[in-house]
Image: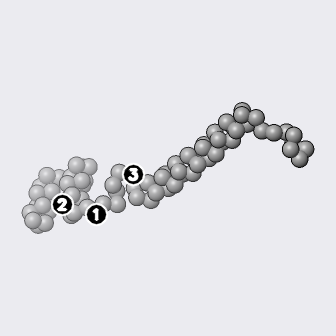
Amino acid sequence: MMNGMPAMGPLMWIFMLLFWGLAILGLVLAVRWAVSRGKGEKGEDKPQTPLEVLKLRYARGELTREEFERMKKELE
């Protein structure tokens, strides 16, 4: 015994290493999650060209084929 406290056995050292390893891993994962959340996970922060927006609207069914072709010609 040292200073009235029992000496830490090998099992206690294993638990301490496991605890701190998990704590550091959790911190790293939390930082990565926060960073990826700020960027947008699917590249949503990438600026889109007007033609890409037009194609997306056509794909969603917001525009008819005639409207799409007319707007596409105006953009080109």
- Rendering quarter of residue 5: top right
Q: CA distance from mark 3 to mark 2?
A: 23 Å
Q: Which residue is mark 2?
A: 51
Is 3 above or below relative to 39? above
Per the rendering, the mark at residue 41 is 3
Left or right: 12 in relation to 36: right
Q: Secondary structure at mark 3?
A: loop
Q: How is the image coloured?
A: one colour
Q: Nearer the viewer, residue 31 or 8?
A: 8
Q: In this view of the protein, which residue sits in the foreground, 33 or 24?
A: 24
Residue 16 horizontal/vertical position (percent): 69, 41
Q: Residues within 10 Å of mark 1 (few under 14, many from 20)?
A: few
Pointer 1 or 3: first along the chain: 3
In the rendered image, which residue does mark 1 sit on?
A: 47
Residue 36 marker: none
Q: Position of residue 56 (x, y in %)?
A: 24, 53
Going 46% across and 57% down the picture, which residue do you hit? Answer: 35
Element at label 1:
loop
Identity of the amino acid at label 1?
Answer: Pro
> Which quadrant would the C terminus be assigned to in this image?
bottom left
Q: Position of residue 26 (x, y in %)?
A: 57, 47
- Crowding at dot 2, Cα within 10 Å, few <14 / some 14-19 / many 20+, comes out as some
